[in-house]
Image (spheres, helix red, strand yellow):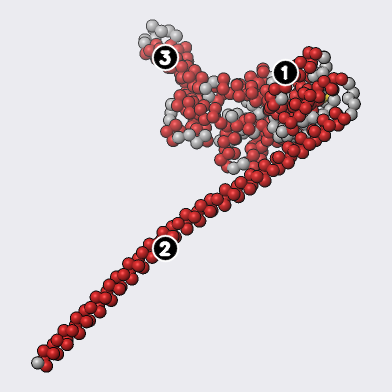
Amino acid sequence: MRERDNAQGERDLAILAYNNEKKESRRWRFSYRDKDRRVQELIREKFAKQLLYQRNVNHHQQNTRQLQTNAQNQLVIRQRDQNILNLQGQILALQNNPLGNMADARRLPVLNLIAPILAKNKPYTGQEPPDDYLDRLIQSISFAQGHMTVLENANAGDFDDAVKCNIYKAQMGGKYLPVPAQDPYNGNANINTPATLRAWMRSHYQRETVGVADNDAQTIGFLKNHLSGDLYTWMRAVAPAGINAFFTNLKDMWLERAPNLNGGQNYQSNSSAEIEKLNSQIASLQAQLAQPAQVHPQNNEASANFEKLNSKVASLEAQLAESMQVHSKLAQRLQLPENVINSNNPSIFDSHINQELEKRLGVIEINLAKLTKLIREDTIDTKSTQYRYSESPDYNNGGLEKRLEQIEAHLAKFARKDTKSSQRQRSESSPFGGWKKD
């Protein structure tokens, strides 16, 4: 009986322990589920806050850019408002004071019409070529051209070229003020029309911004002396009147030249044809020499001709080999593909070299401003050393070496200002770019 009670007690204790363990396990399971749910919520909150943070960063960057744009716009608007106030003050002064003549009164409405448009244009200080500025200025007020024509037709002088010229003069600024009454660059012509004003602006821009007058004969002669061969002869025949015309003609001559430098392709083709002709003559003479002496009593003369032809063929073949070597070195300097450099076909050389040179020819106009300034410095140096260039191609080898040194000095100045890659493109693309002697 006691054993049964003990067993019953142990059973009850085991059941109680089992129930307690079951409750504890359930409690831990529910606790884990709650914690897992909380972790998922925190992860979602973290992701949402990251999105909000990124959006706020983007919004902040947009606001910063907008503030910068607003600041720039405010400066532009302030300057425009100041110009409008100045013009309105001038208009008010004209309205409140008696006019000198009735022509001013008749043209005043048109001036009031174009004044806000002119105020939007910045004064011309050489920030762009004068033709571009004047064309844009004239185009901006072209809507009032009909009113100007009506005034001029009704009363001559109300809105003639002199009045338009004065309007354009008022747009000058900086070193373009004051506009002289006469043009010192073009025969002291009166500056009283848009055309004469344009001519003065071109010359002044060329002198003040580019650094040398367009029609400077010394500079044009200096540029000619950097050419050689056919280019020099052709340029002498054309005789360009200005620097711009010089480079325009140079580009046309370069494009119209023979398909290789100094007519290399024609030289090769003519030399090849001449060699073939000489070979046929040699074969004929050899056949004559092989025949009996009594049939050809002039074999001695044929032998002499044969030797002359042989020497001429050898000379032409040496010239062709030298030409091919020059082509190969030129291809290496132009960094052409290896298959072109190793090719022995003149047509392949000519095709690739001409394409590369024509591609690089356009940089001549880009370097014009820098080159003309260096030319002016060089002419000053040449005066001090009493070294004079002439336009005649008949100069000795010592003068040629000195001129090559001058060209290389110019290229060294460009190299200090530009990167290595851009210097290589500019020096190799120019037809007077200082080829190095091998």
Name the residue beneath numbered marker 2. Answer: 42
* Residue 91 relative to residue 411: left or right: right
- In the image, is residue 306 above or below residue 1? above
Q: Position of residue 345 (x, y in %)?
A: 43, 26
Amino acid type for the residue under numbered disc 3:
Ser
How far apart in space, not on screen, are marks 3 and 1 (Cα)? 79 Å
How far apart in space, not on screen, are marks 2 and 1 (Cα)? 74 Å
Badge number at residue 412: none
Query: Badge 1: how crowded within 10 Å, few (<14), some, or many (20+)?
Result: few
Name the residue beneath numbered marker 3. Answer: 280
Check if mark 2's residue and mark 3's residue have beta carbons within 8 Å: no
Closer to us: mark 3 or mark 1? 1
Amino acid type for the residue under numbered disc 2:
Leu
Q: Position of residue 132 (x, y in %)?
A: 68, 27
Name the residue beneath numbered marker 1. Answer: 146
Q: Position of residue 195 (x, y in %)?
A: 76, 20
Q: Earlier in the sequence, mark 2 or mark 3?
A: 2
